[in-house]
Image: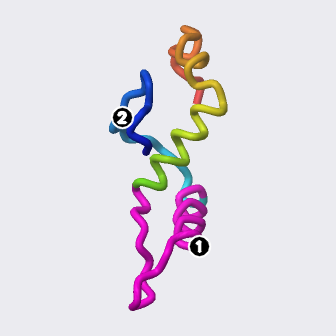
Amino acid sequence: MPENQGDKLLVNVNIEITAAALQAIVANAKRMAPRNSNGTYRVDTADQVSAIISRFLDTRGFEQFARDSTNYEPSAS
């Protein structure tokens, strides 16, 4: 993640995502990653998961979602 994040904080949390979402992130990260002379990938998939989820939260209005107190009510699931 870039150093100059303004008022953003790095928060380490545990979240639930589907196996398919994780597989897609890992596959895309590997496809885009450079390889070393042995042909192995040079990518930190955990960093990629963090980056893609952070980008999703930024573009999908997470701050507004977090401000809405109705989102803190227990879900019916």
Residue at the disc numbered 1: 31
Does residue 69 appear left or right of residue 42 in this picture?
A: right
According to the image, label 2 marks what residue?
10
Compared to 26, does 14 lie above or below?
above
Indicate how the structure is coloured in the image: rainbow
- The number of callouts visible is 2
Residue 1 versus residue 66: which sits nearer the camera?
1
Q: CA distance from mark 1 to mark 2?
A: 26 Å
Q: Residue at x 58, y 69 (%)?
A: 32
Q: Residue at x 60, y 39 (%)?
A: 56
Q: Residues within 10 Å of mark 2 (few under 14, many from 20)?
A: few
Q: Residue 71's mark?
A: none
Q: Quadrant of the N terminus?
A: top left
Q: Is residue 67 above or below residue 26?
A: above
- The answer to which of marks 1 and 2 sits earlier in the sequence is 2
For badge 2, the amino acid type reads Leu
User: Which amino acid is tagged 1?
Assistant: Arg
Q: What is the span of residues highlighted in magenta in the rendered image?
A: 21-46
Residue 49 in the image: state x and y as whole percent: 48, 52
- In the image shown, does 71 or 49 lie closer to the viewer? 49
